[in-house]
Image (cartoon, grey):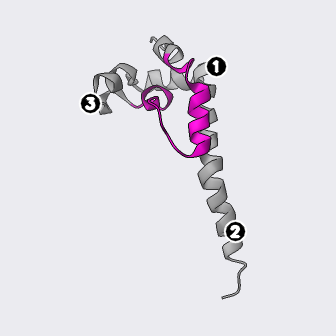
């Protein structure tokens, strides 16, 4: 398993990725190597290059000390930017008089 392709691709763009996620507007091209999918699901050459071969490679990606952290950080950012505010809104909704 060669996960180096992800490290190489992510290194120069992770600051930009986080800025775009926090702004709520994706502007550059990084989806393939920040949120990889299974290779079998990809159609483009880029999607296939960065596609994960199987469950074993996906688990290795997640267990990798750098790649796993680089996956969790944007996922947490998305959660906090979308899910958490929605949850706060819903929690307040049940307290309003009808």
- Residue at 48%, 37% in the rendered image: 27
Residue most toward the bottom? 98
Whole-Å distance between the Cαs marked 3 and 1?
29 Å
Callout 3: few (<14), some (14-19), or many (20+) C-alpha neighbours within 10 Å?
few
Q: Are marks 2 and 3 in contact (CB under 8 Å)?
A: no
Residue situated in front as seen by the camera: 81 or 36: 81
| Label 2 or label 3, whichever comes before in sequence order | 3
> Foreground mark, 3 or 1?
3
Residue at label 1? 65
Residue situated in front as seen by the camera: 56 or 98: 98
- Residue at 41%, 31% in the rendered image: 37
**22 relative to 45 in the view: left or right:** right
- Residue at 66%, 48% in the rendered image: 80
Span colored in magenta: 9-37
Residue situated in front as seen by the camera: 13 or 80: 13
| Label 2 or label 1, whichever comes before in sequence order | 1
Number of the label disc, if any, that sits on residue 43? 3
**52 relative to 91 in the view: left or right:** left
Res 91 quadrant in image: bottom right
Q: Position of residue 73 (x, y in %)?
A: 64, 34
Q: Position of residue 98 (x, y in %)?
A: 66, 88
Whole-Å distance between the Cαs marked 2 and 3?
41 Å
Whole-Å distance between the Cαs marked 2 and 1?
36 Å
Res 75 quadrant in image: top right
Q: Is residue 57 magenta?
A: no
Residue at label 2? 91
Callout 2: few (<14), some (14-19), or many (20+) C-alpha neighbours within 10 Å?
few
- Residue at 66%, 55% in the rendered image: 84
Q: Position of residue 42 (x, y in %)?
A: 31, 30
Callout 1: few (<14), some (14-19), or many (20+) C-alpha neighbours within 10 Å?
few
User: What element does badge 3 sit on?
Assistant: loop
Q: Are marks 3 and 1 in contact (CB under 8 Å)?
A: no
């Amino acid at each position: 398993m060669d996960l180096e392709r992800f490290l190489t691709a992510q290194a120069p763009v992770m600051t930009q990725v986080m800025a775009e996620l926090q702004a709520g507007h994706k502007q550059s091209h990084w989806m393939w190597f920040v949120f990889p999918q299974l290779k079998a699901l990809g159609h483009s050459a880029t999607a296939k290059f960065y596609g994960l071969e199987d469950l074993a490679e996906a688990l290795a990606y997640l267990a990798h000390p750098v790649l796993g952290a680089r996956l969790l950080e944007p996922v947490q950012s998305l959660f906090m930017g979308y899910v958490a505010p929605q949850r706060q809104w819903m929690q307040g909704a049940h307290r309003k008089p009808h």
